[in-house]
Amino acid sequence: MAETVKVGELAKALDLEIVSGDEKALSREIITGDVSRPGLELTGYFNYYSHDRLQLFGSKEITFARRMMSEERLMIMRRLCEEDTPAFIISRGLEIPEEMFKTCAENQLPILRSKITTSRLSGQISSFLDGRLAARENVHGVLVDVYGLGVLLQGDSGIGKSETALELIKRGHRLIADDRVNIYKQDELTLIGEPPQILEHLIEIRGIGIIDVMHLFGASAVRGKMQIQLAVYLESWEKDKKYDRLGTSDETVELNGVDIPQVKIPVKTGRNLSIIIEVAAMNFRTKTMGYDATKSFEDRLTRLIEENSDL
């Protein structure tokens, strides 16, 4: 879990221009994904100043600052520069006041600039920081991209999760993470999965060992992260156990506070799990698009019963 993000990392990720700031300034740490637009602070109201956030200046802030006297502008900028203030960011490629350069140099604060609009820049910054700073949870399983759908394979150790994922990769799908998946909430309903850095692009196959999927199958066989939309639980086949044959059960599994739809697939010699998982992914997608084969079957059955009852 990344508890902080360095200003330099943010600048590189979002392609921000580094207007001023040395290596030490760019090493300042960002601890929150919230962004502050210091409009009230420019008027002198600092009662609720969020000094530990990135300070984003758009057209309104810069235009207001230009109307001040130079001495007043310098005083306000100095008050904005707290010890834990990460950086000043300017949107729309706007011209930066000299007083901002001076106070940032005095406090070793970096100044970054972007050409895009303030609202878009704020959204990009928040999205990047929320993803990097979000609390992570480790789950045992394999995450694969099947037809653009994030499918999490789970089950007991040795059930064949990695081998199934390998077959899916050979069939043109993509690996995100094997064995351990780091998951975090992008928002209240969206769960993202990614591999631990040490296991990135790697998969373990018993009897062979560790293999590098990207080197064996190419860059198109892997992804860095993916939204988890469907969980597939692989379980050993039991002769006397009753399994869902119509698809009427709507099971879910809770991961990091988010309920994910889950299907359980019994594993038995002769069953082609990769094809079954492909079909499960396609069937799940058709359901989200409004078509449910089980409901269609039940409607046909109801009509047939009604027709026979009229005879």
Image (tube, grey):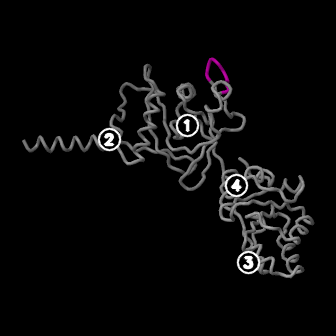
Q: At 86% from the left edge and 69% from the top edge, which residue is drawn?
A: 100
| Image vertical order of residue 280 relative to residue 16, above or below | above
- Judging by the rendered image, the residue that carries numbered circle 3 is 40
Q: Are marks 2 and 4 in contact (CB under 8 Å)?
A: no
Mark with earlier residue (3, 1): 3
Q: Are marks 1 and 2 in contact (CB under 8 Å)?
A: no
Q: Calculate the distance from the C-alpha at mark 3 to the C-alpha at mark 1.
A: 46 Å
- Residue 69 location (% of width, % of height): 86, 82
Amino acid type, callout 3? Leu
**Residue 208 magenta:** yes
- Judging by the rendered image, the residue that carries numbered circle 4 is 129
Q: Quadrant of residue 263?
A: top left
Magenta residues? 205-212
- Residue 39 location (% of width, % of height): 73, 75
Residue 271 relative to residue 80: left or right: left
- Residue 199 location (% of width, % of height): 69, 33
Residue 264 relative to residue 153: left or right: left
Name the disc covering residue 294, or none. 2
Mark with earlier residue (1, 4): 4
Amino acid type, callout 4? Leu
Classed neighbour count for the residue bearing mark 1: other residues with Cα under 10 Å, few (<14), some (14–19), many (≥20):
many
Classed neighbour count for the residue bearing mark 4: other residues with Cα under 10 Å, few (<14), some (14–19), many (≥20):
many
Q: At 67% from the left edge and 57% from the top edge, which residue is drawn?
A: 124
Q: Calculate the distance from the C-alpha at mark 4 to the C-alpha at mark 3.
A: 24 Å
Secondary structure of the residue carrying tag 1 is strand
Q: Residue furthest top?
A: 207
Name the disc covering residue 127, or none. none
Q: Calculate the distance from the C-alpha at mark 2 to the C-alpha at mark 4.
A: 42 Å
Secondary structure of the residue carrying tag 2 is helix
Secondary structure of the residue carrying tag 3 is helix
Classed neighbour count for the residue bearing mark 2: other residues with Cα under 10 Å, few (<14), some (14–19), many (≥20):
some
- Judging by the rendered image, the residue that carries numbered circle 1 is 145
